[in-house]
Amino acid sequence: MKPDGQKEPRRSLLRDTAATTLGMGLRTLAQASTFVIVARALGAESYGAYVAILAIASALSHLSGLGSHIQLVRTVAHDPSSFNRAWGLALAVLGLGIAPAFIGYLAIMYLVVPVSASWYPIILIGVAELVFWPLARICAHAYQGLERMNRFAVLTLLPAATRLVAALALLLIPALQSSTDLLLCWAALYAAASLLAAALALVLLSAELPLPTFKSSYSILDWMRQGTPFALWGFGEKFYLDLDKVMLARMASLQSAGFYGAAHRIVDLLFLPVYALLSSASARLFRAGSESTESAILVCRELTPKLIAYTVAATLMLILSAPLVPAILGNSFEPAVDVLYWLAWLPLLALPRILVQAVLNATGQQQRAVSAMALAATLNFLLNLWLIPLWDWRGAVLATYLAEATMGLTMLLFLKTRTRSNQHPPT
């Protein structure tokens, strides 16, 4: 009986990983198709403007929910009977966080965008990212906390699927009216697709799981306190990953931001299976982390060989497929070939950091992860200020590599310090 009991979690993880990978594979296909359609339709300059707006909105989207999606997973993974209370708290905190996040978004955009820029795309993309996307994300993570990864996969696929339909609709617009502002049209379609995905996710979850309880034994303030480090991490990660695109648009040109953003998007798409595997193991990681740091490290160690094998394959795929970019996206994205060659090694450099980050978050050390991210984001900002005027997008790539290495080493130092203190408790 014992051996069977030991094999079941492994079989469950494999099943969950397969479901999540299938969902994320379809999601990747939908996102890649959307990316190709939108990039070709908008061209490098308008796509660069879209990337810059989306970078700021998606970073601030993590603050509107104050980390409720991760806090929901952690709470339900520890105690599945707390679902309805945790679900109610997640919705309540999201409702409280939307307005401040949106005001901050508008203030930042006022400082960043040129005076002549239209505000309609900015507002529409902001509503999509700060209101609709966080709601859809919380619905998906509700299933993740209960380890119902098939449903989690479906709900993470929904936004990508609805946006693909919106992108296909975008193709019809030039045929109907050639003088239409395609960036504005895409922003409106993007917002509508995000609204539809959030509504469908909420309907599905409400039909299958207990309704939220808003009178909870948990304190909203305590929930916000515990979730805020995750929110700061999500904000810091997006800020760190997308800051260079915004700075390129501001300090170089929208064209540079466009083809740099396109190359970065290709790297992101090929890296999604790594997040699929870690998402499947997240509830298990949180349980192991509640026992000890060593237990969480052991879970990540079991996943590492698969992740390394995939990341090496993804790097080779990026290098070999780079010359195909102009044929797929259009001739205006010809410079993205060189960018992709430069960025191809990023997944290999980022993987160790992502694994250490997973251990820190699972063991309640998310504040340390946020500190490392803040250090890397600050370094990235300063390096971009210096290097972009000198070397355009090459400066942005170099800044990314240096900041990523710094963050990984800082997190590893934090983890080693924690592990050493656990091994030698004070007497």
Image (cartoon, helix red, strand yellow):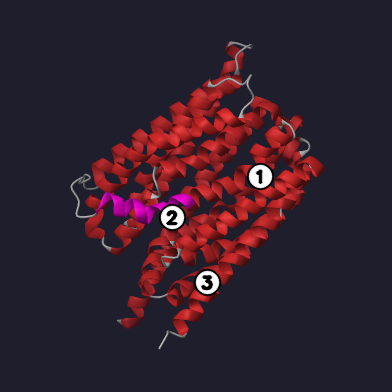
Q: Please state which amino acid type lies under the numbered disc 3.
A: Leu
The earlier-in-sequence mark between 3 and 1 is 1
Tell me the chief SS of the magenta region.
helix
Q: Which mark is residue 264?
A: 1
Mark 2 lies on residue: 229
Q: Please state which amino acid type lies under the numbered disc 2.
A: Pro
Residue 121 in percent (x, y) is at 54, 24
- Residue at image point 39% right, 65% down: 286
Q: CA distance from mark 2 to mark 3?
A: 17 Å
Q: Nearer the viewer, mark 1 or mark 2?
A: 2
Q: CA distance from mark 1 to mark 2?
A: 26 Å
| Magenta segment includes 242 | no
Q: Which residues are magenta?
A: 219-232
Quadrant housing the N terminus:
bottom left
197 w.r.t. 350: above or below? above
Residue 177 in percent (x, y) is at 60, 10
Splitting the image into 4 quarters, where does residue 156 fall? top left
**Relative to the observer, which residue lies in front, 5 or 418?**
418
146 w.r.t. 360: above or below? above
Mark 3 lies on residue: 415
